[in-house]
Image (cartoon, rainbow, N blue to C red):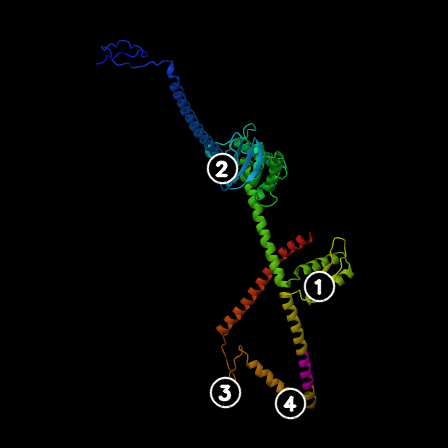
Amino acid sequence: MSDERPDQNTPEQPPVDESRGAASVTLRSSDDTGDTGLLLDRANRSALDALRIAYLIMTWIMIGLVALFLLSGFQSVNEGERAVRLRFGQIQDSNLGSGFQFAFPPPIGELIKIEIGQQTLRVDKAFYPRLDDRQRAQTIEQLAQRGGFRSYNPSEDGSLITADQNLAHAKWQVIYERSAPSQWLTHVDRDFELEQEIIRLSVERAAVRAISEITIDDLVKQSAGSEGSVARRAEQYAQEAIDRAGVGIQIIRLDMIDSGPPLNLYNDFAQVTSAATQANAERDRAQQYARSSLNGVAGAASDELVELINRYERATDLANTDEQEQIMAAIKSVMMGEAVELPAFNDDEQPIAVAENQVSGEVTQMISSAQTYRRQVSDEAQADLTLFRSKLDQYNSNKRVLVTREWASAVTEFLQKDTVQAMILPEGTGVLELLLNRDPTILREQEKARNRQMLNEANERRKEELEKPMLSDVNQGSSR
């Protein structure tokens, strides 16, 4: 049995109080520094890994944001729109069409879309009397028909002054489009109220200028859409003013609506206009009737024949025999279908040239009938002469036979007439009394024939009387 002794190199452990629990923290001496460095190195590596992951995530987030920033610059331009690309406030492209277009998003750039479709603006109050809502919906004719319109107040009622210093009213409607997007964006910059104000002022100035160049009668007569009308001139003046402003707007059409004289005088002007229209219609009908009548009489040579007749009458009044003979010869040649060239005898006349076979219509029929009648008369006279000579020879040879035959022929021809009735009397009748009455059928036929002839003659005279003043007016108009 050996004795066990404690190791002298082992430090003496303090006594443990068994009544206490286990220690929650154990303190180490300076000999444990190696373990502590190892723990710190592991912590640093974990922190670096976490930072590296966070940086990678932030990098992808930044790349995504940049991509989204660039993708937001793509925009769709619709039909009827034009786009302007800006970069740092400067215009890069001024007329981008429909489709997808790119521009750097703000604050670097911007893509501005501008509607280029047709726009409409009405100018209703500037040159019209002050009206209430009910009256404003009526036309100028309806307002004038009601009558009793109040007197004008220059401070409230708008009007225009014509070239003959009369008042007039008109409404205007302008149709325009934004034709130059860059100019429009530079000077208007999407201020639509400014745009309408520019157009309204331009139209008002143009209307004042255009109306001041015509009279009130011309304003009432002309149509709004005719070339050279006040509306077309006002459209030209308004476009010139807009071009000087350089706002990139093009007027498609400027129309004048409900134009006319002052409301108190509208009905009077309407009556005058109606009378003038009716007079023009009657004059046109008369001229048409004259042209148709002249063409029916002389065909294509009617105008030249009328001028020749007028010159012949003028030469007759001046007792100029030489001119009368030359003009009469020219008239005859034209009627016969021959080519004619007649010089001018006075300074206010023009030479007359007519080609061959220009005359037609009643003239040719009358000439043809006259020629036929002349040949017929000549042939009948020649036949009568031949018959007379034949009977003269027979008379010289045996006059009794000739007289007897001629007498029998005359009696036979007389008895064959419808108005002659022959009766055979018995031989030995000494006295015969006949109570004769004219045949009523024959009387009726004769009366119808006389009435028909009188009616035709009256119609011819009436036709000649109606044609004389019309032809006189046409001749006067052509001479003027």
Q: Residues within 10 Å of mark 4 (few under 14, many from 20)?
A: few
In the rendered image, the vertical position of residue 305 relative to residue 242, given as above or below: below
Near-viewer residue (352 or 38): 38
Q: Quadrant of residue 291?
A: bottom right
Q: Residues within 10 Å of mark 3 (few under 14, many from 20)?
A: few
> To which residue does mark 3 refer?
426
Near-viewer residue (235 or 286): 235
Q: Nearer the viewer, mark 2 or mark 4?
A: 2
In the rendered image, the vertical position of residue 313 relative to residue 417, given as above or below: above
**In the image, what residue occupies the spot 29% across and 12% down?**
7
Q: Amino acid at mark 4?
A: Val
Residue 187: x %, y % from top left: 58, 32
> To which residue does mark 1 refer?
331
Label 2, label 4: how far apart the Cα atoms are: 132 Å
Q: Which residues are magenta?
A: 380-391
Q: Amino acid at mark 3?
A: Pro
Label 2 secondary element = strand
Q: Which mark is residue 264?
A: none
Label 3 secondary element = loop
Q: Nearer the viewer, mark 2 or mark 1?
A: 2
Label 4 secondary element = helix
